[in-house]
Amino acid sequence: MTSLALYVLTAMIAWVNPSTHASFEPRAVTVARYESIASDIAAVSEESPVVDGDAAHTALVLASIASYESSYAARVDACKVHGGSDAIRAWSLWQLQVPRGEACGSRLAAARIARQMVEESLLACPRWPLAVYASGRCLSNDKAKWRMSRAHEWWLKNVFELGGET
């Protein structure tokens, strides 16, 4: 696991404790899945950091969005269930409103779509980051504020320092 993935994993566990999923899967399975999610988020964030040009900040935003959208639930991660209404289906940990095949082909693919949507939201609406991602409109809204605030506060309080890779 890379140092960035470990950093993201630490935030994920703080935000949504693996015990939340105890009635659905054994803790060891949850932790292994969290590790895999963190690794995928880190990889996608390092490919193209879109939040302040910083991979760690980008990764935290992606992890924060997923924490609010899905609580990292296994059944959502595996695309066994969708969010939204019957008319508007949202898939993956990031609740992407794209065709199921695009969001559910792989978690890496879904994370890349989410990263692109974050970038588009930041560019379209710098005054209210993530507003377009959360609501489709450049208007202040609590969903966008909560997702960005969670990531940004972690980023400020827990400085990421590149360490040795394992």
Image (cartoon, helix red, strand yellow):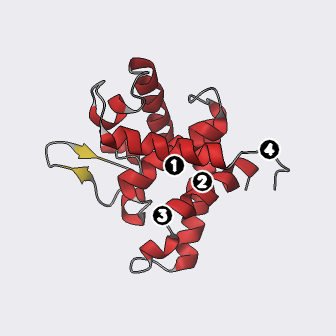
The quarter of the picture where the C terminus appears is bottom right
Q: Nearer the viewer, residue 127 or 69?
A: 127
Instruction: Please give the label number shown on residue 16.
Output: 3
Residue type at mark 1: give it: Ala
Question: Disc 3 on helix, strand or loop?
Answer: loop
Looking at the image, residue 31 lies above or below residue 22: above
Residue type at mark 3: give it: Val
Q: Within 10 Å of the Cα at label 3, are there few (<14), some (14-19), or many (20+) other Cα atoms?
A: some
User: Who comes first in sequence, dot 4 or dot 3?
Assistant: 3
Q: Residue furthest top?
A: 124
Q: Are marks 4 and 2 in contact (CB under 8 Å)?
A: no
Residue 56: x percent and y percent?
65, 40
Query: Which tag is nearer the camera, tag 3 or tag 2?
Result: 3
Instruction: Please give the label number shown on residue 63.
Output: 1
Which residue is rendered at x = 56% and y = 28% of the image?
50
Q: Are marks 1 and 4 in contact (CB under 8 Å)?
A: no
Which residue is rendered at x = 43% and y = 29% of the image?
129
Which residue is rendered at x = 28% and y = 54% of the image?
82
Does residue 152 appear anywhere in the picture? yes
Instruction: Please give the label number shown on residue 162.
Output: 4
Does residue 106 appear anywhere in the picture? no
Q: Are marks 3 and 2 in contact (CB under 8 Å)?
A: no
Query: Which tag is nearer the camera, tag 4 or tag 2?
Result: 4
Query: Which tag is nearer the camera, tag 2 or tag 1?
Result: 1
Residue 10: x percent and y percent?
63, 59
Q: Are marks 2 and 1 in contact (CB under 8 Å)?
A: yes
